[in-house]
Image (spheres, rainbow, N blue to C red):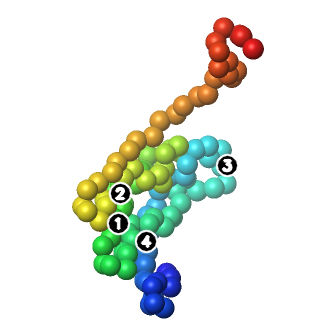
Amino acid sequence: MTLTAFDGQAAYYYFLYESQYVQRACPNDDELTESEVELYFLTGVIRPDGTSFSMPLTDYITPVGIGGCNALSGRITGVTLPTRGKVEWTYRSYGFPHQYEPWGHGAR
């Protein structure tokens, strides 16, 4: 991608992608669809100054060949920063309460 920088200069950003077959995310109840799908994953961003962010395929959840579906399929779990430090995270399900009572005990 080319953006206009200071003094009319151009700033170039490069986006790198890799393809990978992964299981479809849940729910996948349609018997007519394949259980695996080819996705293109963002694996790097190179900034105008030459520094980069890196997200290799190993930083994604890419289950293949275990049957069924996987709710986390295709999600990213980390990124390596231009400083070579790494930020990682996990996913979990969370359910919100059905009724929110900010003052507790049914007070209104």
Q: Residue at x 45, y 40 (%)?
A: 91
Q: Residue furthest left?
A: 84
Check contact, mark 1 vs mark 3: CB within 8 A: no
Please tell me which of labels 2 and 4 falls first in the chain: 4
Q: Which SS class for mark 1? A: strand
* Mark 3: amino acid: Asp
Q: CA distance from mark 1 to mark 2?
A: 7 Å
Q: Nearer the viewer, residue 23 or 85?
A: 85
Tell whether 28 sits left or right of 51: right
Q: Residue at x 53, y 60 (%)?
A: 37
The residue wearing badge 2 is 79
Q: Nearer the viewer, residue 55 or 87?
A: 87
Say which mark, if any, is on residue 17: 4
Say which mark, if any, is on residue 53: 1
* Mark 2: amino acid: Val
Q: Compared to 55, does 4 lie above or below?
A: below
Residue 16 locus on image (x, y percent): 41, 74
Q: Residue at x 61, y 43 (%)?
A: 27
Q: Quadrant of the C terminus?
A: top right
Q: Is residue 6 visible?
A: yes
